Image (cartoon, rainbow, N blue to C red):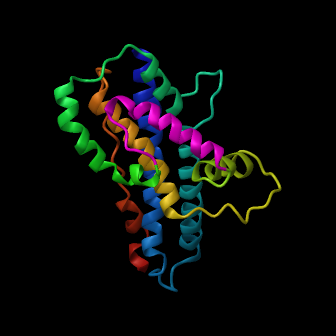
């Protein structure tokens, strides 16, 4: 149980919180970018560019940590949490509860289920369904997951020479990976008897506009 709680709270929830935090900083910067005055001092322009690059790279880094590959070490990652939940003797909450709440869960995460041309799972099938979908993404060389891993491995962790023309990621690809992981956390909170309910940290990014407000 303690291992699962560690993966749930210190692993998935923490990395997901950091990923959303950096993602939302980047989105705030985009909102104000075109409105910055020509009189903006050079040091603030430099700060803006630094924040833009850093928030982008940190978003990629924390998503990559969430979806880390299988390994023998004690890495906290989404796949390990899902496998631990499947192999444990933890019970899914009572049938009456799941029957009433499962449709609400599906509604909250409709974007995830509509992304795949697969039957929508029931509550007892969901975790295995997630593993199968992650495997699909891993086997697709052009998937959002492999783009994130390539960015982390070849650009952020190392400085490898490779064709970067295929590395462009659309917003929906980044958002999909975040939403997929968030759905697993929601499932674990809502249906698995882990004796732990993790609240995802809300991102407070209003400071971004405050920094540049004088020149908007």
Residue 27 is at least partly visible in this image: yes
Left or right side of 55 for 200: left
Q: Position of residue 147 (x, y in %)?
A: 64, 53
Q: In the rendered view, would you say 52 is above or below 121?
A: below
- Quarter of the image where one finds residue 184: top left
Residue ID at (52%, 27%):
80
Q: In this view, does 51 lie to the left or right of 162?
A: left
Displayed quadrant of residue 105: top left
Image quarter of residue 101? top left
Q: Which of 167 and 28 is in front in this view?
A: 167
Q: Magenta span: helix, strand or loop, mainly?
A: helix
Kindly identify the residue that appears in the image at 74 percent across and 49 percent down: 154
In the displayed structure, 118 sits above or below 31; it is above
Residue 37 x/y as whole percent: 47, 84
**Is residue 194 inside the magenta stretch?**
no
Q: Give the range drawn in magenta.
A: 118-140
Frontmost residue, 211 versus 3: 3
């Amino acid at each position: 149980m303690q291992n699962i709680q560690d993966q749930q709270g210190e692993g998935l929830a923490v990395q997901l919180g950091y990923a959303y935090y950096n993602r939302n900083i980047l989105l705030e910067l985009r909102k104000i970018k075109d409105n910055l005055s020509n009189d903006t001092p050079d040091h603030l322009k430099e700060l803006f560019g630094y924040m833009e690059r850093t928030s982008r790279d940190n978003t990629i880094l924390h998503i990559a940590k969430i979806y880390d590959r299988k390994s023998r070490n004690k890495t906290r990652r989404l796949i390990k949490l899902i496998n631990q939940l499947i192999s444990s003797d933890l019970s899914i909450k009572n049938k009456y509860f799941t029957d009433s709440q499962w449709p609400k869960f599906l509604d909250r995460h409709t974007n995830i289920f509509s992304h795949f041309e697969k039957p929508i799972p029931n509550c007892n099938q969901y975790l295995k369904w997630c593993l199968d979908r992650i495997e699909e993404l891993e086997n697709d060389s052009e998937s959002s997951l492999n783009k994130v891993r390539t960015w982390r491995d070849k650009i952020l962790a190392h400085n490898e020479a490779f064709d970067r023309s295929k590395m462009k990621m659309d917003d929906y690809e980044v958002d999909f990976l975040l939403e997929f992981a968030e759905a697993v956390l929601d499932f674990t909170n809502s249906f698995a008897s882990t004796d732990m309910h993790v609240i995802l940290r809300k991102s407070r990014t209003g400071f971004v506009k405050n920094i540049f407000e004088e020149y908007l």
